[in-house]
Image (cartoon, grey):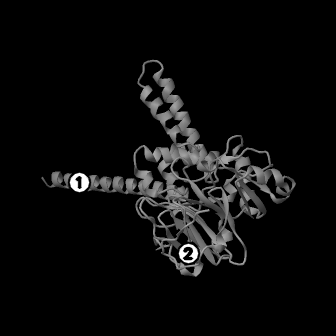
């Protein structure tokens, strides 16, 4: 009887230990995937959401999240007689290539890829808790050694570059000398031309109130006529759901005050240093329901602001009427809007210089508008 109880206690202890080990394994697996997603600039919680985690994974390693459907479909087709094994092999090959791209994205190579394929949980923990940095989406056409050399060169060599972003949201960088040789074409073909260091980051402010940060080194670097890459593929920016309001480099706004204006007439000034964050996407401002950003700019060189509404009302007031606030604040009211009206544009002014716009097909000198305090109804301008 004693031996029977001892055996049961031993089995119970072993079972209890195994359950604890299994729980610890799954907890560590979740934490590891969470941290890997955060290193890649994605929300950690996305790693535990079925299917969506696969979408994000393919997005950060392949550049297109919807490709995750291919191995899913192939796995479903693996049950078909004769052809099923072939579909399964192709799905496994895609999984191995994904692990290779994952290894390269974090600066590793074939050896680490084999580890991810054979001991995936262990090597995921190494990526998560080790000093590994996400370099961006691996570019096709390069071997591992070429990719690693390219990443290391970009990281090691600080140089002045010019980022060119066209009206379709395609981005690339060129060196300063190349820009000067092609300056006229670059200015005519690019909506945004940003001169900065390659160690800097691009700040993409959108109408949804979000800020997307993209490393300049993640943009393809080369000759003037080399291919550009959509901003959608370089970070969390989604051109189908948000519109770019302002793009600049982070270093240029570190010591500046940023002006935010929304379509409901809310205004605020925010220190540019508040946007120096490690995450790739943050809320740049707080918006009320139904509101959106219509203008963002640096306010350092301006002392007045003019707001224009869709119904043709204008108001001009001192910039000092706008308080400095945190990026989490909604702001203060700049103009009292009539029913159905909204702010169309915001014009920062330097009172010592004339500023003219076209209104109702005629020129309007903004400096001649009556200077009042913010929050009023403004003046209906008829030309």
Tag on residue 269? 2
Identify the residue at horizontal 47%, vertical 57% (top origin): 43
Taking depth in this image into account, of 364 and 60 the one nearest to the observer is: 364
Identify the residue at horizontal 47%, vertical 44% (top origin): 54
Residue 42 spot, x, y in % from top left: 51, 56
Q: What residue occupies the far left of the structure in this picture?
A: 1
Disc 1 from disc 2: Cα separation = 64 Å
360 relative to 355, above or below = above
Closer to the eye: label 1 or 2: 2
Identify the residue at horizontal 40%, vertical 45% (top origin): 50
For the C terminus, the image quarter is: bottom right
Tag on residue 277? none
Tag on residue 12? 1
Counting residues from the start of the chain, the first of labels 1 and 2 encountered is 1
Decide if residue 11 is on the left or right side of residue 225.
Answer: left
Secondary structure beneath dot 2 equals strand
Residue 134 spot, x, y in % from top left: 60, 56
Q: What residue occupies the far right of the structure in this picture?
A: 181
């Amino acid at each position: 009887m004693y031996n029977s109880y001892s055996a049961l206690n031993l089995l119970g202890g072993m079972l209890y230990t195994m359950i604890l080990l299994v729980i610890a394994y799954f907890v560590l697996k979740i934490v590891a995937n969470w941290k890997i997603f955060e290193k890649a600039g994605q929300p950690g919680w996305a790693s535990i959401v079925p299917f969506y985690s696969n979408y994000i994974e393919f997005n950060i390693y392949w550049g297109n999240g919807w490709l995750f459907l291919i191995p899913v479909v192939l796995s479903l087709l693996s049950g078909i007689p004769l052809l099923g094994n072939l579909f399964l092999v192709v799905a496994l090959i895609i999984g191995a290539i994904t692990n290779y791209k994952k290894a390269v994205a974090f600066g590793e190579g074939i050896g680490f890829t084999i580890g991810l394929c054979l001991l995936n949980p262990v090597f995921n923990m190494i990526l998560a808790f080790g000093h590994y940095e996400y370099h961006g989406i691996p570019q096709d056409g390069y071997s591992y050694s070429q990719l690693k050399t390219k990443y290391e060169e970009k990281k090691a060599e600080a140089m002045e570059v010019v980022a060119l972003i066209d009206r379709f949201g395609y981005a690339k960088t060129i060196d300063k000398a190349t820009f000067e040789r092609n300056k006229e074409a670059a200015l005519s073909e690019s909506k945004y031309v940003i001169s900065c260091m390659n160690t800097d980051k691009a700040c993409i402010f959108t109408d949804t109130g979000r800020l997307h940060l993209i490393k300049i080194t993640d943009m393809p670097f080369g000759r003037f006529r080399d291919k550009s890459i959509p901003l959608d593929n370089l970070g969390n920016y989604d051109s189908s759901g948000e519109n770019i309001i302002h793009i600049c480099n982070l270093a240029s706004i570190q010591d500046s005050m940023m002006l935010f204006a929304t379509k409901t007439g809310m205004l605020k000034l925010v220190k540019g240093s508040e946007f120096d964050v490690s995450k790739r996407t943050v809320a740049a401002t707080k918006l009320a329901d139904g509101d959106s950003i219509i203008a963002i700019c640096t306010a350092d060189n301006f002392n007045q602001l003019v707001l224009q509404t869709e119904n043709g009302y204008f108001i001009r007031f001192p910039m000092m009427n706008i308080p400095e606030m945190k990026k989490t604040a909604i702001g203060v009211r700049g103009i009292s809007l009539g029913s159905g009206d909204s702010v169309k544009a915001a014009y920062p002014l330097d009172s010592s210089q004339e500023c003219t716009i076209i209104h109702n097909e005629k020129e309007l000198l903004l400096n001649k508008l009556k200077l009042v305090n913010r929050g009023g109804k403004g003046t209906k301008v008829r030309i």
